[in-house]
Image: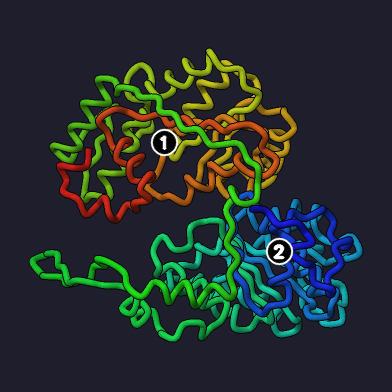
Amino acid sequence: MRKNLGEIGLSKELNLNDLKRPPRNHQVEVLTKSWNKPYYALLMDRGTGKTKVAIDTFSFLYKHDLIDAVLIIAPNEVHTRWITEHLPKDLHEDILPTALYWEGPKKRKEYVSRLRALIDPSKKELKIFSINIEAIITTKASALIKKYLEVNRVITIIDESTRIKTPKTKRTKAAIRIGKKSDYRRILTGNEITNTPFDVYSQFRFLKYNFWYQHNFFLFKHYFGEFEERFTWRNGRKNIFENVVGYKNLGEIKQRIEHCTYRIKKSQCLDLPPKIYETIKIELNAEQRKIYQELKDELCSTYDGQSIDIINMLSLTVRHRQITGGYFPESAAMIGKSNPKIDAILYDLEDIDQEAIIIWAVFVSEIKGLYAALSKKYDNVETYYGATTTKDRMRIINNFQAGKVKVLIANPETAGTGLNLQRSNLHYYFSNSFKPEPRWQSEDRSHRDGQHWPVLYKDIIANNTIDVTIINALKSKTELSAVLSKPLGELL
């Protein structure tokens, strides 16, 4: 049941007319609840406008003379879009900021001058600095951030905060140190933060260092988890480890976080059309099937003058995925005279008249093969993956949204986060990984505010292969580690 603005009751301290774009009711609700709280978690579905809420939050904090600066930590490329796309749309018009995103330790005079302005306490305009999360552990970036926090009153925002869910990583430890020095803190994520209750530990520790009564992760895990001892043999030695078998006291986690958390799903606040899923099943060609089976039975295979050996279960899963995509891992040569998955997409497109199509593929050889095949049929095909330059990425996305790109072939890890691709309502998944997050993120590039048509997702699945295992794992939100614990014979 939606609330109207009168029922929500906007705080007298906030002027709704200051907002650059009219907010939706749920955005007003969370803004009223949280704008001046020292820490808060925006656990809002992808596409529900949590970025706008964050920008309105620090705009009001600045106007009430509570902060001087904003630090935004986000995945690579997402951090640039905060400055180039989100701020122009939502920063209040009466605020003229000094805004800059991290480009690395460059020597260019103009860039260095702007970096220095961020740590100049005499500058009275709002300072906004965004940086990719991988960079916060580097020497020069961490030194800059340390000074930035020393001379300014700062709100630090971590976008896609599940990137700091693992307590032992360097970037998580760095983020928590930054949180301790920040005047205000926010985490933003549209992912299910409690797929495992252990994921909340470091994210909320960033928000407040002593948030948990259990002051280290070991105590936290053993208070909320149930474990049993298991062992493996390696090099003739017995290695004992703890394996989680269940959880307990989960009601305490919910009770602990609810006072500083806003959670909303798209179905509660947006009138979005449905997601529709279809499967296109294909058979491997004879050469693929032979190599696939050899890898399973003999843990080695040869093709195109190249050979591969399987050293462990993880290696087998990767090689099997590459084979089902139609390319031999070492040479990236196409296996056989044609690629069954590419043929299936081309055949399916014969009966489809769509203005914009997105094809998601995991491996570079797949992306290049798709581009070679589809560019013969369409003039306006683009690829977006790790090797795509920052300049080209911006051009490609702008052209796609402007209707100048017919087919976008993209990697989910690279293009699955932070992009608005509502122009498309047809997605093909040429391949998937076991990671649920890139799949969820990539699906929601189109299924978000501004989409008016049902979005169709078509998975290209090779029968009796690891493709089936992956799809079943994604449906049940099963990570790769759970699959690897199964006997080799179960891994098709």
Three-letter code, disc 2: Glu
Q: Assess disc 1: are there few (<14), some (14-19) or many (≥20) residues with their C-alpha within 10 Å of its C-alpha.
A: many
Q: Nearer the viewer, residue 134 or 441?
A: 441
| Chosen colour scheme | rainbow
Q: Nearer the viewer, residue 351 or 297?
A: 351
Three-letter code, disc 1: Ser
- Horizontally, residue 450 falls left or right of residue 267, namely right
Residue that appears at 25% across and 39% down: 308
The reply to whether residue 195 is in sight is yes
Q: Nearer the viewer, residue 379 or 11?
A: 11
**What is the number of the mark on residue 83?**
none
Residue that appears at 84% across and 80% down: 65
Examine the image and state in which quarter residue 309 appears.
Answer: top left
- Horizontally, residue 117 falls left or right of residue 186, namely right
| Residue tagged 2 | 29
Label 2 to label 1, Cα distance in Å?
Answer: 39 Å
Count the labels in the image. Answer: 2
Find residue 150 and report its horizontal and vertical position in percent.
70, 85
Kindly indicate whether the residue at mark 1 contacts the one at mark 2 (C-beta within 8 angstroms): no
Dot 2 falls on a residue whose secondary structure is helix
- Horizontally, residue 402 falls left or right of residue 429, namely right
Find residue 38 and report its horizontal and vertical position in percent.
67, 80
Q: Specify the farthest residue to the left.
A: 236
| Residue tagged 1 | 431
